[in-house]
Image (cartoon, rainbow, N blue to C red):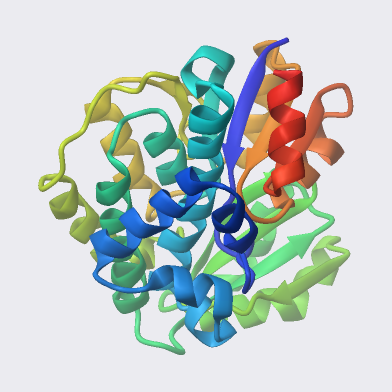
Amino acid sequence: MKYAFVFPGQGSQFVGMGKELAENFNSAKEVFNEVNDALGQDLYKIMTEGPDLDLTMTANTQPALMAVSMAVVRVLEKEFGVQLKDKAAYVAGHSLGEYSAACAAGVFSLADTAKLLRIRGNAMQQAVPVGVGGMAAVLGLSYNDVGALVEACNDSKHYCVAANDNSEGQVVLSGHIQAIEKAVEIAAEFGAKRCLKLPVSAPFHSPLMQPAAETMARAFMEVQANDALIPIVANVLAAPETEKKEIIKNLIEQVTGTVRWRETMAFFKENGVTDIIELGAGKVLSGIAKRSLKEVNSASVYSVQDIEDLAKNL
């Protein structure tokens, strides 16, 4: 068996997440308290009670999803004696999930990861005025085929780029709202089954995020980093890295760069991964793995039962 552990990104959050973990395991409660202390805010209350509007604010969503993922990791380690570094061949995370992966691999402390994601969430929100940027999901076109659509939407003033290459036939565009709206309008002409605008507040993973990338470069100077105990398959490379300087460089590039998730799945397959386990809220990544890699086992681990089952099988 060869395991890869993956960590969810924005969109997997829901009000109530983390509650069952905290009520059943002290080690999970400790994670949520530590994150609250690091941020000087009762984020756990927003996670478990809402309102949804507060939870979906980027500056809250990012550390909240990481906290749930790390609570699952901590429970596995403390309550079941399962050390990720002994079991995982690789870790990876989708967008903000790459920070969860870095925390799980020992690159950053939990408190520093929470602070970095709060800074990242705020910086991404502030990089572009509301209404200037947007994102859209294109279904039914490959990453290569999306290029022609992007070209047709871009002019001298407004552009969009392929921001997330999630899986075969699922690519997310990001950029100026004018280019995004044009993509929604004309995608069918390029063979797309559907193209729908996403309910996001900023054009993530596009060059418009450059001010946020600069903010993150400064933020990383303030934290202690270690080499990774588990190779992290970086979003911008779809290749593994353990060296702390390179991991930080990848995380800065990731703010404006493409999330190469389809290629990350291909990397796992090529390198003999037998099981892809999603740790944290939602089932987005395990769903992609199921569709993309039929011969690889995939599971999402979030509930008490999920954790017990995984610990038994590892």
Can residue 155 be seen here? The reply is: no
Q: In x, y percent, where is residue 309?
A: 77, 31
Give me the residue at 64% from left, 82% from top.
181
Q: In x, y percent, where is residue 204?
A: 46, 64
Seen in the picture, residue 247 relative to 131 is either above or below; the reply is above
Give me the residue at 23% from left, 26% from top.
226
Q: In x, y percent, where is residue 70?
A: 47, 44
The residue most toward the bottom is 131
Give me the residue at 25% from left, 27% from top.
244
Seen in the picture, residue 261 relative to 90 is either above or below; the reply is below
- Residue 79 as seen in the image, left or right of residue 131: right
- Residue 79 as seen in the image, left or right of residue 242: right
- Residue 58 as seen in the image, left or right of residue 259: left
Q: Considering the image in quadrants, where does the C terminus appear?
A: top right
Q: In x, y percent, where is residue 88?
A: 56, 19
- Residue 101 as seen in the image, left or right of residue 150: left
- Marks counted in the figure total 0
**Residue in the foreground of this view, choosing between 188 and 268:** 268
Seen in the picture, residue 277 relative to 207 is either above or below; the reply is above
**Residue in the foreground of this view, choosing between 135 and 37:** 37
Can residue 190 be seen here? The reply is: yes
**Residue in the foreground of this view, choosing between 141 and 263:** 263
Q: Considering the image in quadrants, where does the N terminus appear?
A: top right
Seen in the picture, residue 213 relative to 198 is either above or below; the reply is above
Give me the residue at 40% from left, 70% from top.
43
**Residue in the foreground of this view, choosing between 36 and 88:** 36
